Image (cartoon, rainbow, N blue to C red):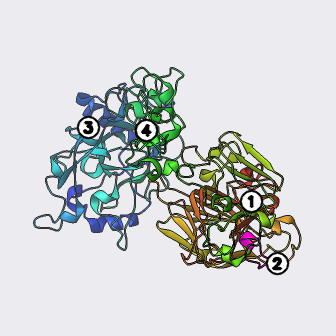
């Protein structure tokens, strides 16, 4: 870069810079006339530079890691290192350069706020504090003003004045604040135009002199260092990339721009040494945290960062260097980073937390969790623990029964046979309330047992098939009983919410716009009657109370009537009827109202139940409970009848309604509704492909 020619003028009768560098001056120094110049002949300066500095030759070494150029309007280019293309590299300039030390050290620091305290009416003779920083030292060259020193390189007679030979604090300093990451840090301290001595001081940061305290007249300039770009500039920092030299008599070179372009002041970094605990290349990362060290023998495999740190093609726990095991089997965390969580991980197979109560009638706590046999939730649904309700044929006729109730006769002459007779219905142990699944199938892993409808009704528990891996004693209209069909695990934390029927993508449901917009809610008031294709997410504790709702169809060509209530770590309590509006669909199937509910446990096992209050007579939608569904009872029969319209999936159903008033009417009735297939609630599309079909309900 060609040097800028200028005339030189030496100020006369000037005071030492120390005496007039007050905060008030620095706030006003922008008013220094733009026509600042020097009148001394350039040839004389050249002689002065070569003779005065000769005893203290400026020498660039491999440690001089700063390169580039700076510019000032009045004296032109500064070369920061003799390796710059086009820079002066022979006498009178010779070899020169500046360096920022990758290692930190203690640095002096002025505090302008102290200057008016006690004897501090101006900069004190000793620093107010010390800080940890990266020292900046060395020399740069200007064809017009000669050598400019930085930091403690200025502490030589050739660069210090005769009227005031010592700088404030006893020595010159320059440093960058400690680099601990990728955040930009400020540079503090001084450089000196050695030929100008007292008049040549260059301030690298307005904060060092209180010139930019935010008051009226504040002037901002400062050098900064950006570890991300490894440049001494960041446009986001007010005042970057300028320094300042100016005197009260009007002399000085004014603002110095250290980053006019990409050839401005920047780092020529040293290679990172991966074992010295120093950020050698000053990019904010030290040793093995630096990407330059990844894959080197100095950096062993880190077992949880997804990177092949030791370059052996094996990542994290796949690397034998990592002894990874699922250390905690009930915390909801993949401790060994191999995919399966808690009991789904084979590491936990022998952990008592993950061993089910295998025998439910041996008086032994098989899984060592403190609960024995039927007191253990693992035995929920086992026929040993949930024996069938008494059937009519279990009770022989007795002299105290007005009708024998089980002999297909009207023994008391009323014309009503068995459980159609009110005398028999009063015997709840004989003519019990029963469940019916209309137009669907029933699946239960641990067997299907319970009350059958009375033979005289001609009704069955289900229309189509009964399927289980164990015993079935309910009835099917099609006489279809399929025992030993194999186990279908309920989607749960242990199975990562997957089973052979589909995938319940909880992680995706939490992400806004993965399946639908996600709205976090505090209570049911956040759920509108038109669901708008939205997932309503609740993550509180205790119970989420759902009052009466009548969901409306979406409107027009964009309206979406589907929606999902996702509850994590709490139970759902339904206190009134949940139903759909009877209005017709306007434009498309997406208009159809379709409500889904997913209730799951948190990592500590809380929540996951659905409770239906006994006054509720109808609920509609798709309901998934990781734990149990309770249909509710007043405890004083007869209870209200309950219609459950849709799809219901749970680990266990507790059918609590007690109403045998009408032998032909089940106390709980599940009726399939195909809305979940036609317009699945957000996030349930995968489940709806196979569970259920139009003729099937599974639980």
**Closer mark to the observer between disc 4 and disc 1:** 1
Query: Label 3 near label 2: C-beta < 8 Å?
Result: no
Local packing at callout 2 (Cα closer than 10 Å; few below 14, some 14-19, many 20+) is few
In the rendered image, which residue does mark 3 sit on?
153
SS type, badge 4: loop
Local packing at callout 4 (Cα closer than 10 Å; few below 14, some 14-19, many 20+) is many
- Residue 422 at x, y = what percent? 69, 78
Counting residues from the start of the chain, the first of labels 2 and 4 encountered is 4
Distance of label 4 from label 1 (alpha carbons): 72 Å
Counting residues from the start of the chain, the first of labels 3 and 1 encountered is 3
Horizontal relation, residue 161 to residue 441: left or right: left
- Vertically, is 270 above or below 36? above
Residue 143 at least partly seen = no
In the rendered image, which residue does mark 2 sit on?
582
**Closer mark to the observer between disc 4 and disc 3:** 4
Residue 652 at least partly seen = yes
Residues rendered magenta in the picture: 412-420
In the rendered image, which residue does mark 4 sit on?
283
Image disc number at residue 461 = 1
């Amino acid at each position: 870069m060609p040097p800028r020619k200028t005339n030189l003028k030496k100020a006369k009768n000037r005071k030492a810079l120390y005496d007039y560098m007050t905060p008030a001056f620095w706030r006003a120094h922008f008013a220094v006339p733009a026509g600042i110049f020097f009148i001394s002949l350039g040839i004389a300066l050249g002689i002065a530079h070569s003779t005065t500095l000769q005893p203290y030759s400026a020498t660039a070494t491999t440690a001089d890691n700063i390169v580039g150029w700076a510019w000032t309007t009045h004296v032109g280019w500064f070369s920061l290192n003799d390796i710059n293309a086009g820079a002066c590299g022979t006498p009178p300039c010779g070899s020169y350069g500046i360096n920022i030390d990758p290692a930190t050290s203690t640095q002096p620091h002025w505090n302008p706020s102290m200057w008016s305290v006690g004897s501090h009416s101006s900069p004190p003779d000793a620093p107010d504090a010390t800080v940890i920083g990266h020292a900046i030292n060395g020399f740069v060259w200007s064809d017009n003003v000669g050598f400019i020193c930085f930091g403690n390189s200025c502490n030589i007679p050739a660069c210090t004045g005769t009227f005031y030979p010592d700088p404030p604090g006893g020595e010159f300093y320059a440093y960058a604040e400690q680099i601990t990451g990728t955040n930009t840090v400020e540079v503090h301290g001084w450089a000196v135009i050695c030929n100008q001595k007292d008049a040549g001081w260059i301030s690298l940061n307005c904060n060092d002199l209180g010139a930019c305290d935010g008051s009226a007249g504040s002037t901002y300039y400062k050098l900064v260092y950006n570890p991300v770009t490894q440049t001494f500039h960041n446009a986001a920092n007010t005042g970057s990339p300028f320094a300042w030299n100016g005197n009260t008599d009007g002399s000085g070179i004014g603002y110095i721009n250290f980053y006019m372009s990409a050839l401005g002041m920047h780092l020529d970094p040293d290679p990172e040494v991966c074992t010295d605990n120093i950020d050698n290349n000053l990019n904010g990362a030290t040793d093995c945290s630096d990407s330059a060290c990844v894959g080197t023998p100095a950096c062993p495999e880190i077992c949880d960062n997804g990177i092949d740190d030791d370059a052996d093609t094996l990542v994290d726990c796949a690397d034998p260097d990592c002894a990874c095991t699922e250390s905690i089997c009930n915390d909801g965390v993949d401790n060994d980073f191999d995919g399966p969580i808690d009991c789904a991980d084979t590491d936990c197979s022998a952990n008592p937390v993950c061993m089910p109560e295998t025998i439910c009638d041996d008086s032994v706590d098989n899984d060592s969790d403190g609960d024995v046999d039927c007191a253990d939730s693992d035995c929920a649904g086992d026929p040993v623990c949930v024996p069938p309700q008494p059937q009519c044929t279990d009770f022989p006729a007795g002299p105290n029964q007005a009708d024998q109730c089980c002999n297909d006769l009207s023994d008391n002459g009323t014309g009503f046979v068995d459980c159609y007779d009110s005398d028999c219905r009063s015997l709840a142990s004989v003519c019990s309330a029963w469940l019916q699944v209309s137009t669907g199938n029933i699946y239960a892993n641990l067997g299907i047992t319970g009350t059958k409808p009375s033979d005289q009704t001609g009704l069955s528990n289900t229309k189509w098939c009964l399927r289980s891996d164990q015993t079935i004693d309910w009835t099917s209209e099609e006489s279809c009983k399929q025992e030993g069909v194999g186990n279908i695990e309920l989607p749960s934390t242990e199975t990562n919410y997957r089973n052979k029927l589909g995938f319940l993508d909880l992680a995706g449901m939490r992400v806004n716009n993965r399946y639908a917009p996600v709205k976090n809610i505090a209570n049911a008031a956040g759920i509108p009657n038109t669901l708008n294709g939205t997932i309503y997410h609740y993550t509180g504790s205790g119970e989420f109370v759902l009052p009466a709702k009548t969901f409306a169809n979406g409107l027009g060509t964009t309206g979406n009537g589907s929606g999902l209530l996702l509850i994590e770590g709490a139970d759902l309590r339904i206190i009134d009827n949940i139903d759909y509006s009877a209005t017709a669909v306007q434009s498309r199937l997406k208009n159809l109202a379709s409500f889904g509910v997913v209730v799951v446990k948190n990592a500590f096992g809380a929540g996951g139940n659905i409770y239906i209050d006994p006054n509720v007579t109808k609920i509609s939608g798709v309901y998934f409970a990781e734990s149990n569904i309770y249909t509710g009872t007043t405890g004083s029969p007869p209870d209200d009848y309950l219609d459950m319209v849709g799809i219901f999936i749970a680990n266990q159903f507790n059918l609590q309604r007690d109403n045998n008033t009408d032998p032909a009417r089940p106390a709980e009735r599940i009726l399939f509704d195909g809305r979940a297939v036609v317009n699945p609630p957000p996030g349930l599309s995968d489940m709806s492909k196979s569970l259920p079909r139009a003729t099937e309900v599974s639980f």
